């Protein structure tokens, strides 16, 4: 437990409910703050610290140690604030759907990071998954190439658990996954993965992955191009229910 936060709330006579009211969040969010490692967004941290009469660094001392590279920060914010996320992947499972074992295998098997760097990246990726589990999660739609489901990453068990985890995620009403079958041949998705985030007011932000880093884009012409690419890859994919059936079939092929 975040003992500093708990003690500060007790000293001020604040409950989870009253702190939530004064900081403009719901009680479940404040409850999560009391867990170790759970840090509010920057503006919320400032409001909470002001209410409690402490400095932000006293409540959350690790916030000054940036875990994300600078180029990723704008996208992390866009992802957190998104009302909808549209994600295409041709090579790996989208980060927000990855299991811990799959994420670790992807990062480790590439052989480009130290063990400590891998573990830090895995922790960050697992933290990001909370976006889909919040009180007001974004509408999440993913399109995957069938090869993502059949490419061995880690052990057969890792793959079986990962594919099953995607199927389980699809039980949520705000999560939809579509698969482009291998019979599709060449299509627009082979040009590379991308994500489209729609934020408050319909503001669009795009994200492109590269070998070196990620590129965050929001210009009108690039948004138009990415939306056209999305419509193209979405048109090649199977309907949601047929995609679930295919994933179920693939999961059964990953035997230990």
Image: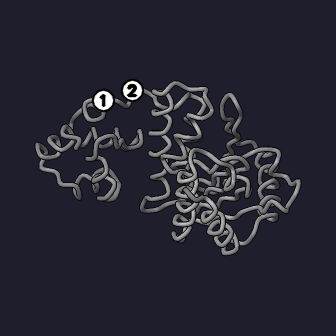
**Residue at 60%, 28% in the rendered image:** 111
Q: Position of residue 182 (x, y in %)?
A: 80, 59
**Residue at 69%, 49% in the rendered image:** 151
| Quadrant placement of the C terminus | bottom right
Q: Furthest residue to the right?
A: 186
Say the numbered circle drawn on residue 61. 1
**Residue at 67%, 56% in the rendered image:** 149
Nearest the viewer among 123 and 140 is: 123
- What residue did someone put label 2 on? 64
Q: Position of residue 138 (x, y in %)?
A: 54, 60
Mark 2, secondary structure of its residue: helix
Q: Position of residue 248 (x, y in %)?
A: 62, 69
Q: CA distance from mark 2 to mark 1?
A: 7 Å
Number of dots carrying numbers:
2
Please give left or right for residue 215 compared with residue 171 in the image.
right
Q: Residues within 10 Å of mark 2 (few under 14, many from 20)?
A: few
Nearest the viewer among 193 and 156 is: 156
Please give left or right for residue 120 compared with residue 220 in the image.
left
| Quadrant placement of the N terminus | top left
Please give left or right for residue 74 compared with residue 126 in the image.
right
The color scheme shown is one colour
Nearest the viewer among 184 and 48 is: 184
Quarter of the view holding residue 145: bottom right
Say the numbered circle drawn on residue 176. none
Please give left or right for residue 227 compared with residue 253 in the image.
right
Nearest the viewer among 134 and 57 is: 134
Q: Position of residue 131 (x, y in %)?
A: 48, 53
Mark 1, secondary structure of its residue: helix
Q: Are marks 2 and 1 in contact (CB under 8 Å)?
A: yes
Can you say whether 138 is above or below 8 in the image?
A: below
């Amino acid at each position: 437990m975040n003992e500093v936060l708990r003690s500060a709330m007790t000293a001020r006579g604040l409950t989870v409910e009253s702190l939530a009211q004064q900081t403009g969040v719901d009680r479940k969010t404040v409850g999560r703050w009391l867990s170790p490692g759970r840090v509010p967004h920057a503006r919320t941290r400032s409001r909470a610290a002001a209410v409690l009469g402490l400095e932000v660094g006293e409540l959350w001392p690790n916030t000054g140690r940036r875990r994300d590279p600078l180029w990723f920060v704008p996208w992390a914010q866009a992802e957190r604030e998104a009302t909808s996320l549209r994600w295409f992947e041709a090579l790996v499972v989208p980060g927000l759907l990855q299991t811990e074992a799959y994420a670790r295998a992807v990062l480790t098997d590439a052989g480009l990071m130290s063990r400590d760097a891998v573990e830090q990246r895995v922790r960050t990726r697992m933290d990001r998954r909370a976006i889909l589990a919040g009180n007001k999660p974004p509408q999440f739609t993913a399109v995957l190439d069938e090869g993502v489901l059949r490419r061995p990453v880690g052990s057969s068990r890792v793959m079986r658990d990962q594919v099953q985890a995607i199927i389980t995620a699809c039980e949520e009403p705000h999560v939809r996954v579509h698969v482009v079958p291998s019979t599709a041949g060449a299509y627009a998705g082979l040009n590379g993965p991308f994500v489209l985030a729609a934020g408050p007011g319909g503001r669009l932000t795009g994200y492109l992955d590269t070998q070196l880093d990620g590129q965050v884009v929001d210009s009108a012409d690039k948004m138009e191009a990415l939306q056209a690419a999305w419509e193209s890859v979405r048109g090649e994919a199977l309907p949601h229910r047929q995609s679930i059936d295919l994933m179920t079939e693939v999961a059964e092929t990953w035997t230990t």
